Amino acid sequence: MLTRLACLAFCGVALCSFLPAATAAEPADDWSRQQIERLPKSEKPIFLFNGKDLTGWEGQIDRHWSVEDGAIVGRNSAENAPAASTYLVTKDKYRNFRLIFEGKLVTSEMHTGVSLWGQTVEKSDDPYSYQGHLVMFPSGYGFYDLYRRNSIYRDADGVAKKAGKQHEWNRMEILAIGNRIRHVVNGIVVADWTDPKPELCGSGPIGLQLHSNKVPQEVQFRGLVLTLDPEDDVITAGEIGDEE
């Protein structure tokens, strides 16, 4: 009997060693990774975020940025709010791309956003401010040209406001090709805009914004699946998915 039990125990351990280990980097509800099946065959996914740490990113990490429960978290307070909006930026630069991700504004009513086609600049002793385009959500939807032209596209008809969720996860896609930006929020194309100044649409790091508003703000991002030189069509429009 003891021999048989010992054998069963050994076999159980051996079997477990061949089973895939669960990892917090790929949560079951990771909508962004699920969209990989929708990608055209010519597009290969690049995972900007590994779900565990901030490898591949730079910013005021010790002060404002961390990884919690498989999400990138940006957080400030009334005491340590940056004098100017600060960004967590990719170390690599990108020009034509598709970005699929989820974003959530946890606290404050100010917007956050994703910056592109620009460069980091120093503002108020912060080397990680950003000059370039900003795709804003979930407050003040639209596009902004940081430290240049200011507001360049507004959600005038309220389509984005209706599609977005103020303090919940929003499923999004940004398609940036040439000088044209398309933004999909929860399956709805909320913006399709072509910049009349293509010379301002060059390669640059992708940034995640933590707003400077002198009140506590927390933002979260997860997924962040990127493809280069994408086909000229969004893939998540009309994709609703399960409600959380």
Image: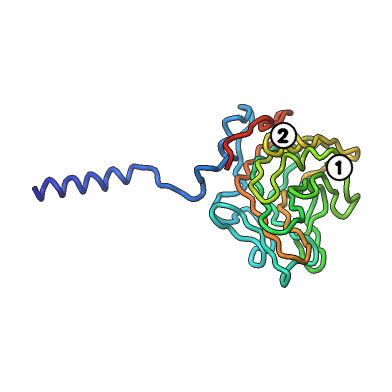
In this rendered view, identify the residue nearer to me: 73 or 125: 73
Q: What residue type is labelled 2?
A: Ile
The figure's colour scheme reads rainbow
Q: CB atoms at circles 1 and 2 under 8 Å apart? A: no
Where is residue 20 drawn, in percent x and y?
39, 43
- Which residue corresponds to the image point at 21% horizontal and 48% vertical from the top-left? 10
- Which residue corresponds to the image point at 80% horizontal and 63% vertical from the top-left? 84
Mark sitting earlier along the chain (1/2): 1
Where is residue 106 drawn, in percent x and y?
66, 56
In this rendered view, identify the residue nearer to me: 111 or 91: 111
Which residue bears the numbered disc 1?
A: 153
Going by the picture, which residue comes out furthest to the top?
41
> Which quarter of the rendered picture does the C terminus lie within?
top right
Where is residue 73 drawn, in percent x and y?
63, 57
Quarter of the image where one finds residue 163: top right
Quarter of the image where one finds residue 89: bottom right
Disc 1 to disc 2, how far (Cα)?
Answer: 17 Å
Label 1 secondary element: strand
In this rendered view, identify the residue nearer to me: 149 or 212: 212
Q: Which of marks 1 and 2 is in front?
A: 2
Q: How crowded is mark 1: few (under 14 residues within 10 Å), some or many (20 or more)?
A: some
30 lies left or right of 210: left
Where is residue 185 drawn, in percent x and y?
71, 39
Q: Residue 211 carries which label?
A: none
Q: Is residue 146 above or below residue 11?
A: below
Which residue bears the numbered disc 2?
A: 188
Q: Which amino acid does label 1 sit on?
A: Tyr
Q: Residues within 10 Å of mark 2 (few under 14, many from 20)?
A: many
- Which residue corresponds to the image point at 77% horizontal and 50% vertical from the top-left? 139
